[in-house]
């Protein structure tokens, strides 16, 4: 790694976080688009910055890249404090914020040759592997004007790879793509992470973030509401326990006065098919509670055919934490 004069090279190499911000704030007049953001992106992760439109995702990325200044807070990228060491950091970062632009009458490979010519000599050697990695090798000699939107996005990432970045920042890379295009982006991101790079992507597509990322920050109105590994966040989400049993209507009444309803705050509802019940248990509920459900039913003379805990998807969990439904604007 080259080290700029005065750059804490060792510190940068040893930093655990690819992105670290504290109290990062950006205002547009009275509108706080980025509000005291404390973001920690682990190195080597696929990290989703997830939130609805207008949540402040693009603004955060623009602040990180120095395209607009922060009003308050500190940040470091790959361990380099920025803006102080922005050049050293940006030399190791590839980013796509706006739709990438290419010459339509040239092929994908020719476009990359032009871009590589403006970089260090090693960049020319990276063209082939970059095209391979983004899944464009077989279309590299077609004109870009014939590329789909997803292929242009992937060519944009190939252009980033000419600089051999440790961190890629992609703003809504799946926006406007069809399912095949989305799958192509997802595969590409997973292969970049498998090589040890860090990929931060912003998205309002909950399902895609859940499928692509290992860790996530959920942002709403400029503020991070929750962040961490998706598996840990979901552990705090409620669990739906599906119960298939005889006499579901009577089974429901058996729980009145048990600890299940009173202490745990479980919601017990009949399922539409009338084959049984669905019991919503709060996050962190232990397996012993499921055994207790079974005991109450059997003691009441109900035949239990099936007990199935179903983990909430990130989508319904997202609605739980943002409480959008109860707090319309
Ligand atoms: N250049 C700007 N000038 C004024 N307001 C802006 C500007 N850019 C973004 N905003 C506002 O900041 C908020 C966050 O926008 P943005 O970062 O684009 O959200 P997202 O990318 O999550 O959709 C929005 O309310 C938006 O209107
Ligand atoms: Mg945006």
Image (cartoon, grey):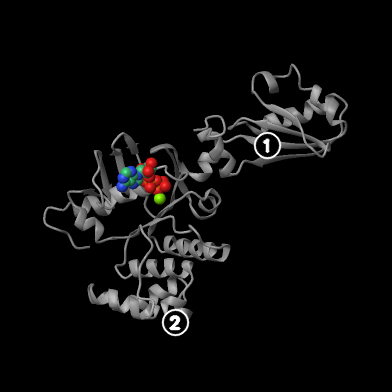
Callout 1 secondary element: strand
Give neighbour class at mark 1: few <14, some 14-19, many 20+ (Cα, 10 Å): many
Q: Classify 143 as above or below 263.
A: below
Instruction: Give the left or right position of residue 24, taking residue 46 as reference.
Output: left
Residue bearing the label numbered 1: 240
Instruction: Give the left or right position of residue 113, taking residue 87 as reference.
Output: right
Measuring 37% from the left and 65% from the top, which residue is drawn there? 100
Measuring 36% from the left and 59% from the top, which residue is drawn there? 98
Q: Nearer the viewer, mark 2 or mark 1?
A: 2
Give neighbour class at mark 2: few <14, some 14-19, many 20+ (Cα, 10 Å): some
Cα distance in 3D space between marks 2 and 1: 50 Å
| Residue that extends furthest to the left in the rendered view of this protein | 5
| Residue that extends furthest to the bottom in the rendered view of this protein | 141
Q: Nearer the viewer, residue 110 or 216?
A: 110
Image coords of residue 156 (percent x, y): 38, 67
- Number of numbered discs overlaid on the protein picture: 2
* Disc marking residue 10: none
Residue bearing the label numbered 2: 142
Image coords of residue 20 (percent x, y): 31, 44
Quadrant in which residue 261 is drawn: top right
Image coords of residue 305 (percent x, y): 83, 39
The quadrant the N terminus occupies is: bottom left
Instruction: Give the left or right position of residue 230, taking residue 118 as reference.
Output: right
First along the sequence among labels 2 and 1: 2
């Amino acid at each position: 790694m080259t080290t700029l004069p005065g750059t804490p090279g060792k510190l940068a190499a040893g930093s655990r976080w690819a992105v670290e911000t504290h109290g990062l704030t950006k205002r547009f007049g009275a509108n706080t688009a980025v509000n005291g953001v404390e973001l920690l992106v682990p190195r080597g992760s696929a990290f989703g910055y997830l939130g609805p439109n207008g949540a402040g995702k693009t603004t955060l990325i623009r602040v990180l890249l120095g395209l607009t200044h922060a009003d308050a807070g500190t940040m470091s990228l790959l361990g380099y404090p920025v803006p102080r060491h922005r050049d050293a950091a940006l030399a190791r970062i590839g980013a796509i914020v706006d739709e990438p632009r290419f010459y339509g009458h040239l092929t994908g490979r020719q476009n990359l040759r032009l871009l590589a010519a403006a970089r260090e000599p090693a960049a020319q050697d990276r063209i082939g592997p970059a095209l391979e990695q983004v899944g464009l090798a077989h279309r590299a000699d077609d004109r870009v004007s014939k590329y789909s939107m997803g292929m242009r996005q992937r060519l944009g990432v190939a252009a980033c790879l000419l600089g051999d970045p440790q961190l890629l920042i992609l703003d809504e890379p799946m926006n406007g793509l069809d399912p095949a295009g989305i799958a192509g982006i997802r595969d590409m991101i997973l292969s970049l992470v498998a090589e040890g790079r860090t990929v931060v992507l912003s998205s309002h597509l909950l399902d895609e973030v859940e499928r692509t990322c290992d860790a996530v920050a959920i942002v709403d109105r400029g503020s991070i509401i929750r962040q961490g590994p998706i598996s840990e966040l979901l552990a705090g989400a409620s669990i739906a326990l599906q119960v298939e049993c005889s006499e579901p209507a009577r089974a429901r009444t058996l729980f009145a006065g048990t600890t299940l309803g009173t202490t745990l705050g479980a919601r017990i509802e009949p399922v539409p098919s009338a084959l049984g019940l669905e019991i919503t248990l709060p996050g962190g509920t232990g397996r012993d509670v499921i055994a207790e459900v079974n005991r109450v039913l059997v003691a009441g003379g109900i035949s239990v055919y099936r007990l199935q805990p179903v983990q909430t998807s990130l989508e319904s969990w997202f609605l739980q934490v943002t409480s959008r439904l109860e707090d319309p604007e």
